[in-house]
Amino acid sequence: MLEANRMQVRAGLFSRGGQQAPRARWFLALSSVLTAVMIASTVSVLEELWWEETFVIVYTVLAVSALLDLIPVGRIYRLFAQLIAVLLILMQLSPIQLGSIGPLLRYMTEGGLAAVSEVARQFSPFLEISLAVWVIYAMFATWTRLRIRIIGFTTVNLLVLAISDSFTPIYLWDSVAIVVFAGLVWLIAEHYASFQQQHPLSWKRLLRYPLQLMLPIVLVLSLVMTTGLVAPEIPPIIKDPYTVWRESQGQQVESFVGDKGIAPASSGKSAKSGYSRNDDKLGGGFNFDYSPVMEVTSSQKSYWRGETKDYYNGSGWTSSEELQDNIIPMPSDGTDIGVMGLEVIGERPLSPDAEVVEIKQSFKMLRKDKFPVLFAAPTARSLEVSNNGRTSYENAVTFQPMINKLGIDLGGNTPYPSAYKVVSEQVVLNDALKEASAAPLNSMPFLYYGQVPVNSQSRVADLAREITADAVTDFDKAKAIETYLSTNFTYTNEPDLSKKRSKDFVDSFLFEIREGYCDYFSTAMAVMARHVDLPSRWVKGYAPGSGTVNREDLMRQGATMDELSEMKGEDTYTVRNSDAHSWVEIYFEGFGWVPFEPTPGFAFPYASAAGSTAPEPSIKPVPSAAPEVAENSPSEANSFNLPAWLGWVGLTVLTAAVGILAFNRREQLAGLWSSYRTRSLTAEQRVVWETERLIRSARRHGLTKAEHETLREAIVRWSEQRRFLKQEFSELLRFFERAKYGGKSVTMEEAAVYSDNIRALRGRLRSPS
């Protein structure tokens, strides 16, 4: 009795409310691994606080701790091994180098506690973070054994990720998906581990059929995860309580639910298309984000410029401080900046041969994201901000004439303008411009626009000179570079970075990777242009977006080319995050900064003078990043457009769902198929046919019938081998002999009942109990 009580006490250490925790070794090992996976996913919320080295150390600590927990030794020994491993990982991976391990251990041994404390301070804060993560892992790896605790641990992780994803600009959707998947696997494992503990004999029988055991698990997990991953991202319908409470106090909560609107600085494949804040390190891959950002009603189709940058550092772009120093308040009441006596470098004064077109734009923001700039067609002349009677933007908008940037300082809780109007003037691409000369690079401020890194690869310059060798004018040089890039390289949002060898971004693109997206093409053209004495700058903003006017439909309705040319792209454009774009501007004396578009599939919509037709682009435009939704009807332009691949994913999910349904209804389907095959048989023939099927099925489960045996002899022997089926065997034999040898005929209803009994008996042969 005393020993039994001790066993109950030990079992109670891992149970609550009478529920005993599973003790299967495979479940304990899996729990350790899933605990580490969940913690590793959740610490991603610290992306903006931790260094990259910290993440490497933490992930390594979790991985090694989980692997050590797989060793079948006592818990104390595993904890001690994990502690030693944490210290060794810290010494090897932290950026603090204190020499080899041997002398360091000798120093701490001889110096005592003071030496140990000194060494520990050297490893701060990596030591504290590593130990904290290890302690959290060790605690939860032991504690999360019951179903209620697994659910609680998973829920806490999901809450942390969900709150961080909603109220920070960090992308955590991948981490959420990993935690959900790990939680589902964990709960399934706990169910089977409990079943194994409570019914060991049945568990052994169940293991004889691994396919039947694993197939439903794999199908259900695949269906759940695939559905969640491909579901379109939509904004929340109901506000969360925290936001409602803050707004009731007159405060605004910045929300990042769904798409972030502004692309993260990271260039990893997990990034999404959007307006980036940080461009000093370009490259990598991204996913297309088709969520709408703004609607622009414009008198002419254009690119919507955000800002320009002049300094190329070999991996990306920044702005020189000297060009940013000249900052002036921009009137937000529609006042023309020309009235203020401002001479915008590169825009004024213009040559007498220069023609300009006025472009009137009305911007309506479709999100509450905050951008550091106001967008406009180049080049803005006046601005009018709508405050809806609530917010004043006086002195909030600034203009930097040297870089043509409309900046906006949104301090405190000031929201980004929901609507504003801009009037821009754009230089017409006429013959005089094509004959104009580029500005000399030895004069201010164009010295900044001829800069290339000191260690710039010479083969980039050689290639630029080779491409432009036959060009007559500076404009021809620019067009030659633009055409070379757009026709000799491939557009992709997933460039193969494994081909990259050169440290220089442009050099690796031109000679190694040879594929990429707009940042690759625009940076390459800007740098190559500087190598042939063309002052250039890198520009980022948005491509035009999708309009509501379909010119092909208008032509089918009888519109003439003259009528279409008079429209000049006047339309309302829906601009999405997938339209985020970068291009190049080159300065021509007397004409200012002229845009060029080297990215394949894009074409800058140059302005045309009154009565003339806009120049036809050499490369026909295709959708910038989204599927073919450009130039749709009004209803289509405002609808949600799904990527083409989603149809295939949906078909796959539907096929899997049909397969799961068929598997779950296999008995009914087998009955229907059996009825179809025996529709032409008499009742007696059907009884014989079903009996022969049973004999074949029994043979597969170890119940044989020899050629010389009668059915009665076989049934008697089977009844000894499967005693729990003796009664069913006896009823089967009695009905079979009556149908085959009796003088009374069998009805079709009796034959159908016999068929159902045979089918049920075959099922029990497969799963003896």
Image: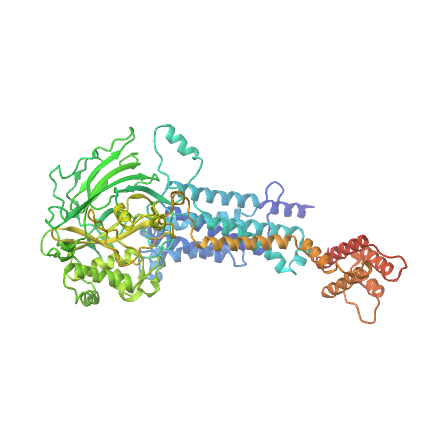
Q: Is residue 377 above or below residue 447?
A: above
For the view shown, which residue lies furthest in the right direction? 743
How is this picture coloured? rainbow
Choose between 312 and 748: the one closer to the eye.
748
Choose between 252 and 76: the one closer to the eye.
252
Left/right of residue 46 with respect to residue 29 in the rendered view:
left
Q: Is residue 405 visible?
A: yes
Quarter of the image that includes the C terminus:
bottom right
Left/right of residue 164 with respect to residue 416 in the rendered view:
right
Residue 495 on image: x %, y %: 34, 60
Choose between 637 and 767: the one closer to the eye.
637
Number of marks in picture? 0
Q: Is residue 259 above or below residue 395?
A: below
Q: Is residue 132 visible?
A: no
Q: Which quadrant holds residue 715?
A: bottom right
Q: Which quadrant holds residue 655?
A: bottom right
Left/right of residue 190 with respect to residue 238 in the rendered view:
right
Q: Which residue is at a point 62% across and 56% down the rendered structure image?
A: 213
Residue 156 on image: x %, y %: 47, 42
Residue 417 on image: x %, y %: 29, 36
Residue 538 on image: x %, y %: 22, 53
